[in-house]
Image: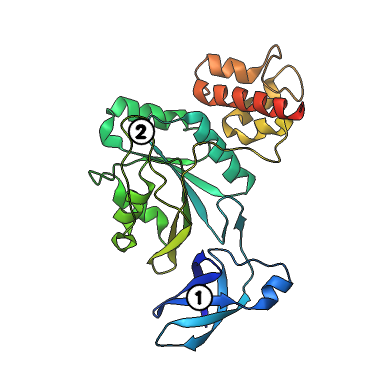
């Protein structure tokens, strides 16, 4: 029988089988012997040990279409990066790091700004404009009013979607809006420190429709970029692409070089200054890592 791992806790794996529910399973020792660790999102073959108690064993992990390392999940089709438009104010530098991690893993990504009811249309439009050239679809929603939630749901149909973002931006509330049975603790954003409680403590997939799964993940306040070379960073800002050949120097890193077409485009408003400043900060942080 085939199913999908939706949660793993303390050596037990919970496998969703379409039309038959969720089975608590152990993974056979052969996986440990081969150094294979089952992941949330894995498609598996399983044998039923007790139909009534919904217990079984995982006998085979089927080939993976993709693997994300953080969050650890197999067979994801897309990622949705959730940030709040306000309360807490969006940390665009952190958002850009999320985007880089997803790009590094080859994941199609949607940017979603929640709490749209807390800002005026000009502020919401400005956020969308910042990322207009990022190569990602950008949407604005409000879970509390329902604005845009149906649009969000439509993007999930027939796909396995990973949601990621910092604490307090409404990921768990959005999961509950899409799939009320999730019964997830949503918590409240602390008025003092403007951060949310880490209400999601493990990654779990929710079967929200036929062949449609949604994963909420623990919130992150910082992200460390591993395995990046500062010289390659520019290739992961798609809005820079049209200007590469116009720079004076081949291999221009768009930092202190003269006659840089990217910096000129920023000055002319053709590239988001916020995105460029994120690029500069990340470039400098990567340069610093190399010195120690």
Of 12 and 96, the residue lying toward us: 12
Q: Is residue 230 left or right of residue 213?
A: right
Mark 2 and mark 1: span between their CA atoms?
Answer: 37 Å
Looking at the image, is 5 positioned above or below residue 291?
below
State whether residue 215 is above or below residue 9.
above
> Which of the 4 image quadrants contains residue 32?
bottom right
In depth, the one of 155 and 198 nearer the eye is: 198
Checking the image for residue 101, the label placed there is none
Give the residue displayed 55% in from the left and 52% down from the top: 71
Q: Which residue is mark 2?
A: 85
- Tell me whether circle 2 and circle 1 mark residues in contact (CB < 8 Å): no
Q: Residues within 10 Å of mark 2 (few under 14, many from 20)?
A: many
Q: Position of residue 161 (x, y in %)?
A: 47, 56
Residue 17 vertical placement versus 82 (above, below): below
Q: How many marks?
A: 2
Task: Return the residue at label 1.
Answer: 3
Q: Position of residue 126 (x, y in %)?
A: 38, 26
On the image, the x and y values in percent for residue 140 come to 35, 39
As helix, strand or loop, the secondary structure at mark 1 comes to strand
Q: Position of residue 207 (x, y in %)?
A: 40, 66
Q: Quadrant of the C terminus?
A: top right
Q: Up-down: is 266 above or below 226?
A: above
**Helix, strand or loop at disc 2?**
loop
**286 or 264, which is in the foreground?**
286
The scheme the figure's colours follow is rainbow
Task: Work out whether mark 2 precedes mark 1 in sequence or the reverse, and give the earlier one.
Answer: 1
At 57% from the left and 45% from the top, the residue drawn is: 102
Rate crowding at label 1 as few (under 14), some (14 to 19) or many (20 or more) other CA atoms within 10 Å: many
Residue at the far left in the pictured view: 145
């Amino acid at each position: 029988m085939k199913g999908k791992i939706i949660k793993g806790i303390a050596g037990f794996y919970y496998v969703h089988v379409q039309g038959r529910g969720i089975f608590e399973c152990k993974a056979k020792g052969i996986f440990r012997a081969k150094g294979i660790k089952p992941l949330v999102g894995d498609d598996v073959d399983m044998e039923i040990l007790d139909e009534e108690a919904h217990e079984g064993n995982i006998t085979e992990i089927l080939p993976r279409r993709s693997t994300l390392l953080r969050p650890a999940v197999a067979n994801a089709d897309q990622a949705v990066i959730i940030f709040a438009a306000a309360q807490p104010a969006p940390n665009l530098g952190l958002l850009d790091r999320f985007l880089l991690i997803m790009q590094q893993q080859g994941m199609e990504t949607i940017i979603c700004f929640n709490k749209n009811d807390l800002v005026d249309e000009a502020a919401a439009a400005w956020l969308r404009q910042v990322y207009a050239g990022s190569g990602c679809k950008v949407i604005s929603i409000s879970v509390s009013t329902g604005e845009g939630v149906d649009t969000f749901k439509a993007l999930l149909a027939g796909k396995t979607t990973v949601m990621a973002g910092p604490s307090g931006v409404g990921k768990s509330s959005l999961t509950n809006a899409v799939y009320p049975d999730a019964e997830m603790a949503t918590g409240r954003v602390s008025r003092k420190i403007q951060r949310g409680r880490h209400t999601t403590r493990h990654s779990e997939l929710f079967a929200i429709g036929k062949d449609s799964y949604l994963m909420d993940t623990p919130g992150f306040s910082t992200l460390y970029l591993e395995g990046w070379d500062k010289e390659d960073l520019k290739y992961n800002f798609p809005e820079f692409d049209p200007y590469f050949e116009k720079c004076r120097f081949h291999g221009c890193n768009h930092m202190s070089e003269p006659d840089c077409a990217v910096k000129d485009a920023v000055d002319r408003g053709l590239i988001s200054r916020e995105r460029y400043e994120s690029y500069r900060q990340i470039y400098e942080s990567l340069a610093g890592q190399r010195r120690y």
